[in-house]
Amino acid sequence: MISQVINVNVKKEYENEKFFNKVDDSYGKRVEETEHFSKHMFNLCADINAEFLHECLNTAQHYAHMQKKYSGDFPTGYSIDDLQNLIEKNNQIWTQTVENIDSTYTNILNNCKNILRMYNENYIQSMKYFERNYEFMQKNTLKI
């Protein structure tokens, strides 16, 4: 009779361990798949963005070459120096804007990453706290 109870408990413990190992393994696989998917999608988005930017550059350069080619046919109604100064100011403003946006978003994303890490550590600490209290309660509670 006692050996049957022990066998049932051993079998139950084995099945529980098998189940939780499978759950743990499954979670790990889902996280890896999701991480791979996320990296793949963001890389594709970056590739599309780069292609779009380069095509815009090619179009703008072709347009500039056409203007250069045919500009001698028309009278000049503007100051070349003023336009060059305007272009230089626009380039400086654009460069500063991109650097500021990059810096801002880098800081925001680093803060988000740190917050997620902190949240995870706090959650794990909370689970350890409840685990210790549960074990303490199990040891110090009278069994009926």
Image (tube, rainbow, N blue to C red):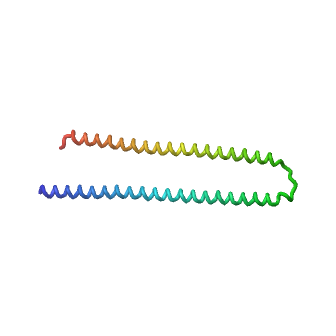
Identify the residue shown where x is 46% and y is 56%: 35
- Closer to the camera in the image, 92 or 30: 92
Using the image as rendered, state which of residue 96 and residue 129 is in the foreground.
96
Q: Which residue is at a point 78% across and 60% down the rendered structure image?
A: 66
What residue is at 48 percent from the left and 45 percent from the top? Answer: 113
Q: Quadrant of residue 10?
A: bottom left
Tell me residue 83's x, y (percent): 78, 48
Return the x and y of residue 49 as percentages of the image width and height. 61, 57
Query: 69 or 37: which is nearer to us?
Result: 69
Q: Residue at x 38, y 56 (%)?
A: 28
User: Where's residue 57, x and y in %?
Assistant: 68, 57
Q: Farthest residue toward the left?
A: 1
Q: Is residue 14 left or right of residue 129?
A: left
> On the rendered structure, is 22 left or right of 7?
right
In this view, which residue lies farthest toward the right?
75
Left or right: residue 9 compared with residue 91:
left
- Left-right relation of 42 to 13: right
Rendering coords of residue 77 (x, y %) = 86, 51
* Circle count: 0
Q: Quadrant of the N terminus?
A: bottom left
Q: Nearer the viewer, residue 139 or 47?
A: 47
The image quadrant where one finds the C terminus is: top left
